[in-house]
Image (tube, rainbow, N blue to C red):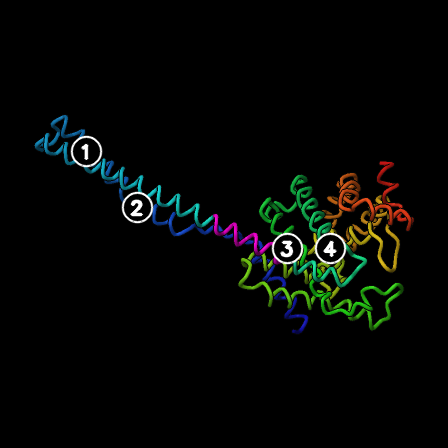
Amino acid sequence: MHYKKKRSKVKQMAKSAKQTDFSFMSERKAAGIFYMIITPAIAVSVALTFFSARKAYPFPSSYFLIVCAAIQIAGWVIGLAATKKMILKTKEILAQAKKIQKIQDRLIMSVADLVESKDSFTGQHIQRTALYVERICKKMIELGYYPDELNEHTTQVMKKAAPLHDMGKMNIPETILEKQGKLTEDEFKIIKMHPLWGEKIIDKAFSGIEDGEFTQYALLMALTHHEWWNGNGYPLRLAEQEIPLCGRIMAAADVLDALLTVRPYKRAFTIGETMNIFADNSGIQFDPLVAEAVLELETEIAYLQIDAINASTIAEAKKKDSGLYKDAEEN
């Protein structure tokens, strides 16, 4: 697809991802219609009963009172029965939906783990970046940034979609992913294709399995997590607000974890060094508001990083003189 068409598609997808589905179940609609009909009927019967009792209308009071009472009782009985049925049906639907959701969540993580298994140097990367996405979103909500797009619901959707951001790496040879040295120009061109490949894989694998909102977020996060705020990123060279917010947040989480961990071509940076990089690149590589949220999370990130890695991995990282754990302990 031509890049101009792809950029237009990103804008359309970002717009649709912002829309929240507030549709209700058919049982609720049916119950609502029922109460719209039965409630006025009961109200009318009560009113007529009152006026008849006061002899405001020349109705045979005894018969009329019996009829009105019967209507009211029938209405209440039918209403309660309908409500009970609706509640039971709703519980059954919710239980089934929860079961399906668990299966879908396991599928997502299994696919993401498969991608991660290709690169022995990025263990637990998907779990950590998902956690960083969640923390960044919550900090931005706390700071009052992008209130039209960020809330608890969108935070959880982004966290769930984050593990799929590197799906495109499935198409990259392991010799390139694990190369311990500078990549050649041709190798880097291959690396730069993985966001486009990731979008295609997610679209093909998850459309129809997951809900549309999740798929849209996952597609956008995979496609745009290497775009830069100043337009110098890849693959589409989007800039500023052209980059979907979920992509800007995913970009920060991805870089954050890359800096803090050992890679074939680099040592792990310390927390202090990492925060300096984010401060220096605010408004260049990163959305300034996203970068500010990361800087606000400095202490929390240090301890999240330690908690996410087991004791043996910590010992190995110390042997490699990563500096991360010493810095964290001093804080």
| Disc with the residue nearer the chain's start (4 vs 2) | 2
Give how far apart the Cα atoms at labels 2 and 3 are.
Answer: 39 Å
Q: Is residue 97 magenta?
A: yes
Magenta extent: 95-108
* Figure check: 64 above or below 1: above
Front residue (pair 321, 212): 321
Q: Are marks 4 and 1 in contact (CB under 8 Å)?
A: no
The amino acid type, in three-letter code, at marker 4 is: Ala
Q: x and y percent of residue 81 in the render?
A: 31, 42
**CA gap, disc 1 and disc 3:** 56 Å
Total marks in image:
4
Neighbour class for label 4 at 10 Å: few (<14), some, many (≥20)?
many
In the image, what residue type sits under mark 2?
A: Phe
In the orientation shown, which residue stands out farthest toward the front?
A: 312
Residues under labels 4 and 2: Cα distance? Answer: 50 Å
Mark seen at residue 34: 2
> Predominant secondary structure in magenta?
helix
* Separation of residues labelled 4 and 1 (CA atoms): 66 Å
Give the crowd class for mark 1: few <14, some 14-19, many >=20 residues within 10 Å: some
User: Image point 76% across, 42% down: which residue?
Assistant: 307
Which numbered disc covers residue 251? 4
Where residue 219 sits, quadrant-wise, is: bottom right
Specify whether residue 307 is painted magenta. Answer: no
Q: Amino acid at mark 1?
A: Ala
